[in-house]
Image (cartoon, rainbow, N blue to C red):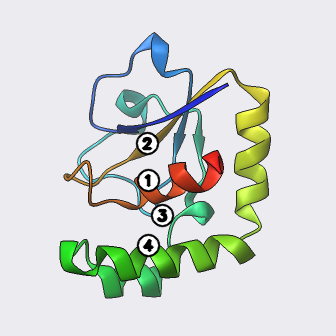
Amino acid sequence: MTVQIKRVYETPDPLDGYRVLVDRLWPRGLSKEHADVDLWLKDVAPSPDLRTWWDHDPDRMEQFATRYRDELELNPAVAQLREVIAAHPVVSLLYGAHDPTVNHARILLAWVER
């Protein structure tokens, strides 16, 4: 099984496998038809309060990662994500952030891989 992350604005590729949007908000300017999302699992994203506090600030990334991992420990949506991963040979976790390193999907990927 392979789990990877990909920016949702990138062109869908057959090698993406099962495409799961892991953002709480639908990406701006992207129609649902063009996104080619198989599942929108918004509840696995950071809570609204944590997302607002973080505001994609690179200086807060380490503290954000700790807080997000703490949320994931108690998040029932993680079980659904694990079921999806177990059911598909390739899963792409899709995110909308501009920065490929400053985004929650990287933390989520590391979380499910452990």
Pick the residue in front: 49 or 90. 90
Badge 3 marks a residue whose secondary structure is: loop
Marked residue nearer the N-terminal end (1 or 2): 2
Circles 3 and 4 in contact, beta carbons < 8 Å: no
Say which amino acid is labelled 4: Ala
Pick the residue in front: 16 or 30. 16
- Image height of 34 relative to 70, above or below: above
Residue visible at 31% across and 73% down?
A: 61
Marked residue nearer the N-terminal end (3 or 2): 3
Q: Where residue 24 is drawn, which disc sits there?
A: 3
Circles 1 and 2 in contact, beta carbons < 8 Å: yes
Q: Which residue is mark 1?
A: 105
Quadrant housing the N terminus: top right
- Label 3 neighbour load within 10 Å: few <14, some 14-19, many 20+: some
Q: Where residue 65 is drawn, which disc sits there?
A: 4
Whether residue 47 is visible, yes or no, is: no
- Label 1 neighbour load within 10 Å: few <14, some 14-19, many 20+: many
Residue visible at 53% across and 52% down?
A: 110
Q: Image quarter for residue 60?
A: bottom left
Q: How many labels were placed on the picture?
A: 4
Residue 24, image x and y in percent?
48, 64
